[in-house]
Amino acid sequence: MKKILAVDDSASMRQMVSFTLKKAGFDVTEAKDGNEALTIAKSNQFDAVISDVNMPGMDGITLIRELRGLPDYKFTPMLMLTTESGMDKKTEGKEAGATGWIVKPFNPEQLLAVMNKVIR
Amino acid sequence: MSIDLSQFFEVFFEESFEGLDIMEAELLALTPGTHDLETINTIFRAAHSIKGGSGTFGFTVVSNFTHVLETLLDQIRDGRRALEQQHIDLLLLSVDCLRDLLSALKAEEVPDEAVANKLKADFESILADGVCGEYAANESEDKPSSTQSSGWAIKFFPFPYLFKTGNEPLYMLHELEALGKLTITADLSHIPEFSKLVPDECHVGWDIELHGNIEKEQIEEIFEWVLDDCDFSLNPIGEVTPSAEVEDTKEESEPSIEPPAQVSEEKKETKPTPTQAAKAPSAVKKGETNSIRVAIDKVDSLINMVGELVITQAMLCQLAEREFDENNVNMLQEGLAQLSHNTRDLQESVMRIRMLPISFVFSRFPRLVRDISQKLNKKVELKLIGEQTELDKTVMEKLSDPMVHLVRNSLDHGLESPEARVAAGKDETGSVTLNAFHQGGNIVIEIIDDGAGLNSEKIRAKAIENHIISENEELSESEVHDLIFRPGFSTADEVSDISGRGVGMDVVRRNIQELNGSIEVNSVAGEGSTFRIRLPLTLAILDGQLVRVADHTYIIPLISIIESLQVDIEKVNNVGGSVEVLRLRDEYIPILRLYQLFKHENAITELEHGLLVVVETDNEKVGLLVDDLLAQQQVVIKSLENNYQRIEGISGATILGDGRVSLIVDIAGLIKLAGLKKPGKQGLSIDSLIQEMA
Amino acid sequence: MTDIATTEEDIKEQSVEYDHEEHELEATGESRQFLTFMMDDEEYGVDILSVQEIRGWEPATVLPNAPDYVKGVINLRGTIVPVVDLRQRFGLDSMEYGAITVVVVVKVSLENNDEKIIGLVVDAISDVYTVKAENMRPAPDITEHANAEFIENLMNVEKNMVVLLNLPRLMEFSQSSAVQATS
């Protein structure tokens, strides 16, 4: 079973993402901000990471940059959840090592379609 | 796969309301002209989360409105726009507006968008002013018209580092394959000689021909993430087809896509079932859902305790299987002691689940104080102490209104105007402090102001005027201060916009007494007042004094007991032939014979042989005659009304250690039952009786 | 006490068996089941589905100023349940409570969708009847019965007449009378 780390400070979004992915057969671990995610990621291996951008403590872009620097996450797909207005964030995220992005708002079907682009 | 998003609504609303509280608190902390990045970031994040969630869960009214708000915040955050007072005011109004919108949506009502639209226009006029042409551009972003072709030639040559972005070219090719017929030629010309090969780099490129009626965007979407990480070109093969021919091709290709179309139809047919099933629980959810969020450590400690309980239970079971002898008795006693220890811990932990920090109530005061002090032209500093003090959720909900009233009162009547303060040699900024702490099994909340204090002369005069006390009645300073809690003290002619609203301090006291609590005031003229509220930590449990009347056991709430004493018959007078009154120090205490009120036989009827429990409620003292005092213990309150009906003089029931039911005495009800209070008439007949004697 | 315990259990077992039967019958809508008990040589019945349990009499906690037929409240596994003496409620002479005095605990749905649980003190449990619809003939002279207000129906079972109780009506207690303190 593929393991995914889902990071979002909003409980409802986190639950929605996690629920959708679990229903699609993924093994999902949740984290509520970058710091928590980094700690979890260091002691586990994930097949993909999906993270919100705006979070207290460590934001999503910093998280992706930190993770990409780790040997275990060199090639791991990492997606960020962003809003339509944030084109500059997409570029910033890509520079930090993000694989791609999902634009909010999205529905469960869209989420799965995007996940399908990076892990199968 | 269909996922019913409504299952996440409750969490979404909960966190959105929390987010709004955070926004409000942080906005109040902002000062115009400054650039407090951290605070603005926090506000931005809260707004951003609400926008993201509302968009995802289909609450477009909210997400549209939050969008303008976020745009402004974003500009302030980036330093593109200086923070002005009008921004803060507008954002605060937006918080209120969002709260209304979300409340309406939560209650499954149609939200009123009038306020939102007005505020949105305000935001837009700010945004249109200066800095931001980008904003308008954002909105009117034109979608490029789609181009179609019978096929596409794609050149896709990733840069060597592509794998390190986490992208997988193979998956992209798979996705292309799903769109139409592919012809792929791998370009291996860039593969370096073996000695120079870096295994985690990509050296292969592809020339791809994709055949079929496919939109350009569909292809671009696949490569969207890697456009900057590869050589990429996309060109139509052959002529661009005019729209008429598009239809032709569609018709032609129809037979080939028929099987999948059937599949999707089947899917449609089966779909209603899960949707209907999903709808049922959401209907149940309608209206007020009562849930609480519990910190994980509380749940963990519960689990630990249940674990211990299981161990104790196993140990007792083992004992039961053995032959019974003296040694076992010791072990049995030990086991039982352990069991009672476990039970008590468990009870406490379960109670803790309902406990929330009082910051839930405190957090609304910065805004309230800001608004009121602006209205009154007073300068006020609000201090919050002990925000993490926990109390029962139900108690908290009922505490809010009395506290708002008290704080309004402190601002309106307590604190002086800046001029008056300076004249009195004080700092022109007054202070109001909310302080919460635990004391014994109670929570104490103090509302402290450094204002003018209560004016004893005025209170006294007014009490006489309103016939609450008689002209020659002698009262101590604190007794005079206590008069403000009497029904009928505050009168209509001094209802002000701020603290008036026709509610008096008597209502505050009654509300707090309904929670089995008490309130008192300490005041020093010229230095300020302290209102002290004392409440039990929970409504479900009560500290009780068990008393015996004949062979019945009753429970008197410990919080209302002042003292218990043996009656000195010499000091008892019979007033008007109907009420016995005990002279206790400077007071006259009416005696209520419980056995008489409850019609119990075989009780002690001679005053000097029984015990008198002096209790206080609603600022009235009465003595309850009982046969004997028994133990004091915490009791769990159970309702009598669930299966029976209300009983005058009884507030509820509980189950004692031996499994028997015992009734909890309601003192206010007893006074009514005894006929000491004439319904519909303000003031107390006790007072008039005492006046008769004086 | 042991006697009662066995009786109790017997009845419970019985009712479990009957429950199965009940479901089958209910589906066809042909008949209902009633638990009946005796009072003053008259047989009264309640719908067996409303019966929660049957227990022996135990002293209840007296409720101050309650009507005399309300014997008090008992602890039914953590729930406070009032106990009513059905004899007194019907204006019959009360009997001394003894080892065979039985409390039938019933749950009643009220009009406002509320449910209340109440214990009824009766002389003794009589029987469980399955009554087919065609045998449930409402007697024409209900109003002439002394306690007409508590009667939902009269029915003939075999050769006996059973008074079917109107439970919601029994749940209405007269307000406790306020007393004035006089000394």
Image (cartoon, rainbow, N blue to C red):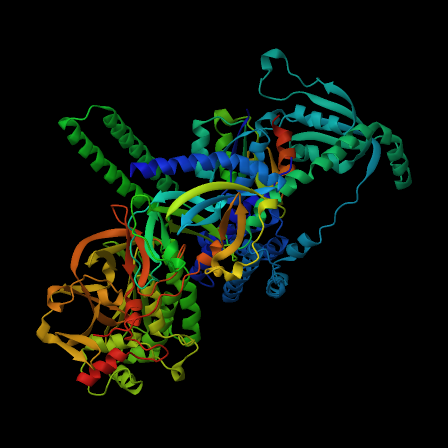
Please give the name of the residue rendered at 68% of the width and 20% of the height, measured from the top-left corner: B204
Using the rendered image of the protein, determine whether residue B52 is visible from the camera's viewpoint.
Answer: no
**Residue B396 lies in what quarter of the image?**
bottom left
Q: Nearer the viewer, residue B155 or C75?
A: C75
Residue B562 position within the rendered picture, expressed as x and y whole percent measured from the top left? 19, 65
- Which quadrant, please, contains the C terminus of chain B? bottom left
Left or right position of B338 against B220 = left
- Which quadrant, please, contains the N terminus of chain B? top right
Please give the name of the residue rendered at 8% of the width and 75% of the height, measured from the top-left corner: B570
Residue B26 position within the rendered picture, expressed as x and y whole percent measured from the top left? 44, 57
Using the rendered image of the protein, determine whether residue B610 is visible from the camera's viewpoint.
Answer: yes
Left or right position of B687 against A60 = left
Residue A51 position within the rendered picture, expressed as x and y whole percent measured from the top left? 53, 38
Q: Nearer the viewer, residue B561 or B74?
A: B561
Q: Nearer the viewer, residue B491 or B164?
A: B491
Left or right position of B636 against B585 = right
In the picture shown, does residue B200 fall above or below B38?
above
